[in-house]
Amino acid sequence: MKRLLGVSSKMTRLFLAAALVFAELIVSIPQSSAETIYACANNKSGSMRYVAGPNLCSKNETQMSWGVTGPQGPPGGFTVFDADNTEIGPLIGGLTSPFG
């Protein structure tokens, strides 16, 4: 059997087949295009459940909705790690770049 990178051709074919199946699964996952999330809140207990759209709540529930996209938040900070990947702490003073 011919070997590629120290792995038999049978293992190589098996890996490639698994990679193709995984890629197909990733591509086939439906992407949400909804811009609004809807839910119904139980008036007595306060528990909530997601619903597919507006006007799907029962009489003992209150419809709630909110947008998927919110306002821009503040930029995140940077954490410094040493050569052993041990966290040292936050970066103080920011980063500099030759590109500005």
Image (spheres, rainbow, N blue to C red):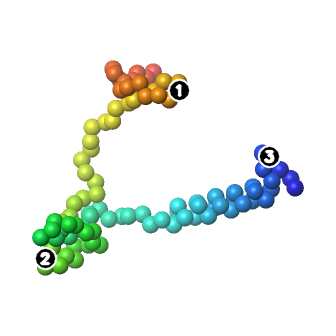
Where is residue 62? Give x, y as percent.
14, 70
> What residue do we see at 38% from left, 30% from top?
78
SS assignment at label 1: loop
Image quarter (top left, top right, bottom left or bottom right) of the N terminus = bottom right
Mark 2 vs 1, N-terminal side: 2
92 sits left or right of 40 in the view: right
Where is residue 46? Give x, y as percent.
16, 66
Number of numbered labels in the structure image: 3
Which quarter of the picture shows residue 43? bottom left
Residue marked by disc 3: 6
Question: How far, Cα to Cα, is label 2 from label 1?
Answer: 57 Å
58 sits left or right of 24 in the view: left
In the rendered structure, find residue 60 and report the number of the disc placed on it.
2
Give the answer, above or below, for where 90 lies relative to 66. above
In the rendered structure, find residue 45 and report the number of the disc placed on it.
none
Q: What residue type is disc 1 on?
A: Asp
Residue marked by disc 1: 84
Give the answer, above or below, for where 69 lies relative to 54. above
Mark 3 vs 1, N-terminal side: 3
Dot 2 surroundings within 10 Å: few (below 14), some, or many (20 or more)? few
